[in-house]
Image (tube, rainbow, N blue to C red):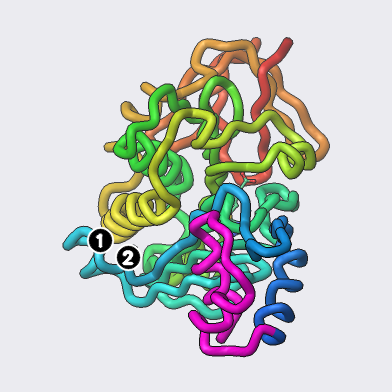
Amino acid sequence: MNLVDILKVLSDGNFHSGEELGKALGVSRTAVWKHLHKLDELGLELVSVKGRGYCLEGGLDLLDEAVITASLGDESRGLIQNLDVFTDIDSTNRYLVENGLGGDVCLAEQQTKGRGRRGRDWVSPFARSIYFSTAWVFSGGAQSLEGLSLAVGLKVADALAGLGCRDLQLKWPNDILSNGSKLAGILLEMSGDVSGECKVVLGVGINVDIPERIGQSIDQQWIDLKSMGFAGTRNDVAIALINKLLPLLSTYSDTGFKPYRQAWESLDAFRGKEVYLSSVNNRVDGRAAGVSDTGALLLETDEGIRQYSGGELSLRLRS
Ligand code: BTN
């Protein structure tokens, strides 16, 4: 028996006695009890009531590899090579950067060292968000990947819109916002030959149902799918992501960003707004003027329209 077996039983949010858990899992009550202690480490609050047993209040929305695999569309079924669903991992991106081959997909219930853009951490509580990564190999070098992270943002927004989410916007280069707050983030990590064959690991984090207590440690304004009225499951989100992202990756070196530009601009949260773009030691003020055919940010500055690209930049509203 492993921890996930107990979690599956408790995921219904009902009370289960130690004896019942032991019977269902084919182990002694002592073994059950030892496992229950580990729930603490996952940040899960187990309620224990004498005479009734144990319960995880509100239940758990767990990922299910079999459900995900069975529900993939024909196109992504032909593109996916391997699907790993981890109960606990440091980072799904790190895992695929080190081990992933083209077409591999990795999901996790929790990340202990989730990576964000610009060296930040990505808060990754157990079973409360989507932690998704996929690897793809491109032969045309870094240049053929221009704009990819924006196209990914657009496809993530498409996937969520398909699940009924409304009022989604994109913030250059690749944040997904709703009501001005961050709903999802994207991290692309590239390795290999910048002018030849390179591997891209694309990571997506989507807030699904972040507990208030944990939300306090997120250092920017955030929103989650639950507060937007989403009533589906994390499996639904994972399936929609795979179905949108693998076809994008498989065709991107032929299409580039151009065919996605208009759709991206229609969701641009900052279009026409007074903004500033900052890097570690530089700041440019201007008015956001959309994006180029390669996904570069267009800024109207005192010196005319300027184009900016690169992963270490951050765009903010001027107040
Ligand atoms: C950002 O800072 O906006 C990017 C966040 C990306 C988080 C995701 S969660 C799955 C994948 N694994 C990681 O360690 N990071 C990405």
Report the amino acid beneath label 2: Val
Queried on whether the Cβ of the residue with tag 1 lies below 8 angstroms from ligand 1, the answer reads no
Element on which disc 2 rests: helix
The magenta stretch spans residue 5: yes
Q: Which residues are magenta?
A: 1-29
Residue 80 at what x, y percent from top left?
31, 70
Q: Residue at x 56, y 24 (%)?
A: 306
Report the amino acid beneath label 1: Ser
Q: Nearer the viewer, residue 160 or 148?
A: 160
The magenta stretch spans residue 22: yes
Circle 1 residues within 10 Å: few <14, some 14–19, many ≥20: some
Q: How many marks?
A: 2
Q: Residue furthest bottom?
A: 27
Q: CA distance from mark 2 to mark 1?
A: 6 Å
Queried on whether the Cβ of the residue with tag 2 lies below 8 angstroms from ligand 1, the answer reads no
Q: Image height check: is 29 above or below 18?
A: below
Circle 2 residues within 10 Å: few <14, some 14–19, many ≥20: few
Q: Nearer the viewer, residue 108 or 170?
A: 108
Taking the image as shown, residue 274 lies to the left or right of residue 173, namely right
The residue under label 1 is 71
Please indicate, yes or no, whether residue 310 appears anywhere in the rendered image. yes
Q: Image height check: is 93 above or below 47?
A: below
Q: Residue at x 61, y 46 (%)?
A: 311
Q: Residue at x 71, y 37 (%)?
A: 212
Q: Are marks 2 and 1 in contact (CB under 8 Å)?
A: yes
Q: Residue furthest right?
A: 281
Element on which disc 1 rests: loop
Quarter placement of the N terminus: bottom right
The residue under label 2 is 67
**For residue 295, what is the image quadrant?**
top left
